[in-house]
Amino acid sequence: MALKNPKLFGLNVFSALADVVDREQSLNSLNLYSRDLDIIRGSQNAGASSGDWISFSRLIDPLYRTLDRYKTDSEAYGTLLDARAGTERTLFGNLSINGILSGNAVRYRYLDGTGSGATVKIADISTSRVSAWSSSASPVISTSPISYGAQVSIKSGGALQFGTQSGTTGPRLRTSLVPQVKEFASEFPTSKITCTIGGQSVVLYAMKGIPLIFTGFFRNLNASIGLTSLISNTSASWKIVETANPNNFTNFANRGNTTSSIKFRSSVSRERYIQFYYNPDNISKITLTSANITELPAVKLQNATELNFSNNQLRNFPDFTFISPTLQSLNLINNPLSQSEIETERKLNSAVLNKIPTSVRDLYLAQTFFGSIPQNIIANRFANLRILNLSRTNDTGPYYHPDTDDATCQLPNVPIDCETYSVSRNDFRSFGTSVGAAKSVPDLTNLISLDVSLNWNLSVVGPFSIADGNIVIQSIRSHHTKLPLPTGLSGKNSFTTLYHYWCRNAGPLVNGGTYLYDNCNSLSTLHLYGSNVTGSLPKFTNAALSYLDLRLTNLTGGGPGDETNVIPERTFEKCPNLQYMLLQSPLLLTAPIHPNVFSYTPNLYYLWYISYGRTTGNIPSLTLNSNLRFLVLHYNKFTGTMPSFTSNPNIRYVNITYNALSGAIPPLKNLQNLNRLLVYNNQFTSLSTFANLSNFQYFYAQSNKLSGEIPSFAGCPNLLYLILFNNLLTDYKTGGLATNYKLRYLDLSGNLLTGQAVNQIIADLLINYNTVNRGGVTVNLRGGNALPSGVALDSIDILRSKGWSIVYN
């Protein structure tokens, strides 16, 4: 069969692949060269592995990538390669290299001895940077200049010959790259090789893995590499090189100390090399994120313990047992590993985990794979695991979910000493059970942080209990699940935060008369918004509690055995640090709040209480809450009067709408932070003074029983909205709106304003406009009010011509 499409996977192909009889021609049609295959052939006997073969990725052509692409299009490649590219024979032949061969060395054959007594042996040539040999200086010392890609040959007399790329004739290590001279102070030889040639001892200095090169596609880059120590007190250097234009590069010489960091910035995204110049054996950690790196260089980082390649484009899982055999922390978050070219490695299974050293303690594989996970493979592989992160960071990309391998999709077990367990935004369904050293989450005694949130169908048979022996648990995120409120936490002083909102099976806070989190003295956040929390309120015994969110729950309120008050007096007696108290339920008792309940919370900052018209009585006293900023008592059945907030100088937002409050809206003075006051749908009868309210912008008092005079708002210079419709107002204080130059909306419709009051309002608004010209102001005087007359009508015409909207009957 002939391949008709001349362009495939970016390769120009014009030759037939499967209809050529001649073996050599078939290889040439595939752009595979017998010289390259000779190099690879027989390398297994010389100690090479398949991983080493993959590292021969840049000979005449990038064989590994080329063959892999042909594999998906033509099965003919198999027999062709079998004939020429096995791994059962000794490696031989000249090399033509155009990039990094990596690894420690390339092996070659040589004869030891002469005549019939000569034996074939294997020797190494350093090729990590094309070929990095010491110069021809004599004698050669460690500080001699290094020439890369230089010619190495043996003269007829047996002595070692150095030369330039085109200097001498005879056998030589060939390269298509221009030899590079030493550029940075950090380019130290990594190895010293002593050879005896013709009875003469020769010392060679080789540089392996310098520079360490990554290829990415990026515009901006933040990168950091840590070092175990400095060589001769010399800092590392970097180079960013545009792959399509090697002359376009940026050097970062002598950066940092044992931590070397760079920030590269460009106006356009390009494919670029990231080159790091230092001995790989000195690298302790690498942080190289968001650079669209598709593969890692096959260079051994013997002492690297932390690798962070998150947010790149790695598809084939690297062999970290080779790259970093002592690795402790591995972060590959948000890499498309589920798209691996190796079908058996598209899920998190043993084949993948076997490529990670057993020394790993922190494993971050969020947003990488999909499907279920064999429950015990992680625990069986990593006995010292401390952190497991399988969470997704957003709603895109692969995630863990039920499949044909495991329809229950149980959470993976981990070693008992695991401290951080995070599997958020997946579709795990159950906890499973512990098996030997592989422990289920509820059995972990050293767990500090647990995040199983946003696994919408995650449930448990029976209680969701934390291990009794766990005295270090700090944080639980179990929101957006089917889990009940976690138990087994009473008296645990390490416990600080619980996020259990939007949980359908939350259940009661009080069980058998006992508060679930009794005497958790460090508990600061209890976030139960939108959960089916039921029953009475406990007496909260959490000295550090600062945030309590019980909105959209099904609490009935009252205390255990006490239904006199919907919130009993001593509910928060032991919570002096409470700042946010938010409670909303349609099942609350038809009873008042105890008037002194908030006298125990001097730091109260935000109070939200909605009972859907069930709570009666007066608004509880807020005189001891000087830090109060936000007050939402919307949609209750409070009676009595409105607070004057003289004891709340920091109040900013007040919403007491839809209640049965009556009497006068009290004078509001010297409240420098007050911005919004919403008091509509009550039974207030009159307005008082508004003075020194420099930030007051919104006043909504419609649908009350306000009568008498509209007061002056001169003390509210930033007033934007004044809404007083559907009241019984009859009069207006002259000059009351003349200086409100930021007024945008005035609604006085549905009142009983006299003609004189209406005319005076129009006059003041014209004064207002003449002082600060502006359009876009809306005025509504419809319904029940007298009609404007005389000069007022002319003033309305003027204001309308300036972009004002004024309507009346």
Image (spheres, rainbow, N blue to C red):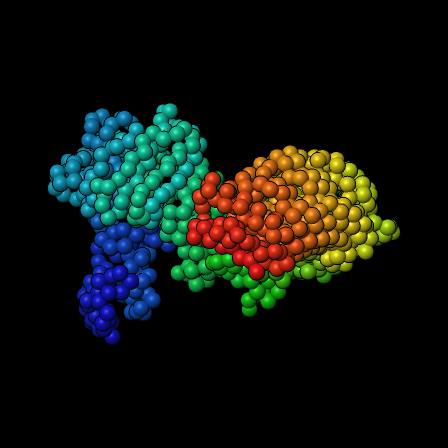
Q: Nearer the viewer, residue 673 or 157?
A: 673
Tell me if residue 731 can be seen. Answer: yes
The location of residue 44, given as percent across then percent down, is 35, 53
Task: Tell me the residue at 20%/28% (across/down).
Answer: 137
Residue at the limit of the structure toward the bottom, as seen here: 1
Location of the N terminus (image quadrant):
bottom left
Task: Tell me the residue at 29%/31% (across/down).
Answer: 184
Q: Nearer the viewer, residue 45 or 321?
A: 321
Residue 227 left/right relative to 358: left
Tell me if residue 104 can be seen. Answer: no
Q: Is residue 260 above or below residue 32?
A: above
Q: Is residue 337 above or below residue 496?
A: below
Residue 167 left/right relative to 771: left
Residue at the limit of the structure toward the front, as seen here: 790
Q: Nearer the viewer, residue 577 or 12?
A: 577
Residue 317 left/right relative to 758: left
The location of residue 306, given as percent across then percent down, is 47, 41
Q: Residue 461 sits in which quadrant?
A: bottom right
The location of residue 753, given as percent across then percent down, is 64, 52
Location of the C terminus (image quadrant):
bottom right
The location of residue 674, given as percent across then percent down, is 62, 40
